[in-house]
Image (tube, helix red, strand yellow):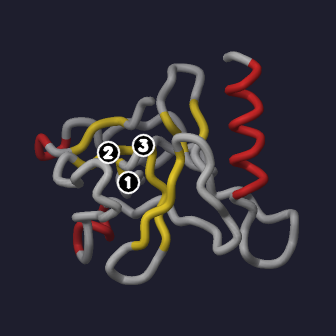
Amino acid sequence: MKLSGIALLGALALAGCGSMGTSSSAPSTPTQAADGTMIGPTGKTLYFFAKDVKGSGASECYDACATNWPPLAVAETAKPIGDYNIIIRNDGKRQWAYKGQPLYYFVKDAKVGDKTGDGVGGNWKVAKP
C-alpha cells in the first residue's frame, strides 16, 4: 500500500471514532483486508447492493433487507474523507459509502473472512475499491 493510502486509512480511523465521547470507541470506517476486500471495523466483509444507484446519496435497502444486510453505520462525529462519503438514509441514520456506493454487512457472515453474501440474489457483491 502506498504511503498516501496508509495516511488515508489512518485519517479515516480518526474521523470515524465512535460517538460515545471516548477515544477508546472502535472506528466505524471501512478498511481493506490483505486480499483487497473492504472490511468494516468488526473485520467482517462489506458488500455493495446492485439496486443502489451509485452517487445518488441513497440506499435502496430498508426493512427486511436492512435486517439481513445491515448498513455500515457512521459515528455522529465522522466526516467524509477521500473516496469515503456519508449518505443519510430514509430512516435518518448515517451510512458509509465508497465513491457514492453504500456499504453493507451480511448477517450470515459468521466470522472474519466469510464472504457468504457474494452473489446472493444476483444483487450483492463483495466491496472492493
Left or right, residue 22 beside residue 34: right
Using the numbered discs, state the Cα–Cα distance from disc 3 to disc 2 in whole angstroms: 11 Å
Residue type at numbered disc 3: Lys
- Residue at screen point 78% across, 53% down: 14
Percent across and percent down for residue 98 are 45, 44
Q: Residue furthest top?
A: 2
Left or right, residue 48 beside residue 105: left
Q: Which mark is residue 54?
A: none
Quarter of image, res 119: top left
Quarter of image, res 76: bottom right
Crowd band around label 2 with a 10 angstrom C-alpha radius: few (<14), some (14–19), many (20+): many
Camera-nearest label, 3 or 2: 3
Crowd band around label 3 with a 10 angstrom C-alpha radius: few (<14), some (14–19), many (20+): some
Q: Which mark is residue 48?
A: 2
Precedes in sequence: disc 3 or disc 2: 2
Q: Residue furthest left?
A: 122
Residue type at numbered disc 1: Pro
Dot 2: what SS?
Answer: strand
- Residue at screen point 32% across, 39% down: 116
Percent across and percent down for residue 124 are 23, 44
Q: What residue did someone put label 1 on?
A: 102
Q: What residue did someone put label 3 on?
A: 99
Residue 15 versus residue 65 in the image, above or below: above
Left or right, residue 73 beside residue 28: left
- Residue at screen point 37% across, 57% down: 107
Using the numbered discs, state the Cα–Cα distance from disc 1 to disc 2 in whole angstroms: 6 Å
- Residue at screen point 72% across, 25% down: 4
Percent across and percent down for residue 99 are 42, 43
